[in-house]
Image: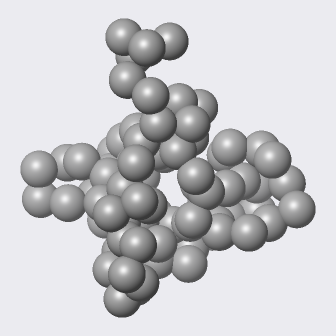
Amino acid sequence: MLEEFKEEEIVNKVGGRFKLSSLIQKRMVALNRGARPLVEIPSKNPMEIVVKEIMDDKIYLDSSGEVAIADDGSPDGAILEDAGPSLDDL
């Protein structure tokens, strides 16, 4: 089990267990469809990548419940929002 789930910090950061579950599921789908990770970690485990993105404030759920990428001021921010190929392409 990932250590971050033993603490309430990740739950509080996202705004509750339901939002955390939704954010993890949606981001993992994007990663599995080819989206680029927003963090560099030695693991290729999608769950560890998503947890690190959340803990580093790289992603969050916007007001419509969709995954949003935190604005870090980078000029290529639009590229980071690429969720990979559509389900029709797979």
Q: Position of residue 19 (x, y in %)?
A: 32, 51
Above or below: residue 25 compared with residue 43? above
Residue toward you, 29 or 51: 29
Question: Residue 39's x, y, as percent?
Answer: 65, 69
In this picture, residue 5 sits left or right of residue 41: left
Residue drawn at 58 percent across, 52 percent down: 36
Residue drawn 44% across and 61% down? 80
- Which residue appears farthest toward the bottom when viewing the image? 73
Q: Relative to residue 65, is residue 82 drawn left or right?
A: right
Residue at point 43%, 14% (across, down)? 89
Where 75 falls versus 17 (above or below)?
Answer: below
Q: Is residue 40 visible?
A: yes
Q: Please tell me which residue lies in front, 80 or 20.
A: 80
Farthest left residue in view: 64
Q: In the displayed structure, would residue 73 be above or below residue 14?
A: below
How many numbered marks appear? 0
- Residue at (80, 66) in percent of width and height: 41
Question: Can you see residue 21?
Answer: no
Q: Position of residue 61 (x, y in %)?
A: 28, 58
The picture places residue 27, in percent across and down from the top left corner, at: 46, 45
Residue 67 relative to residue 3: left or right = left
Quadrant housing residue 46: top right
Q: Quadrant of residue 18?
A: top left
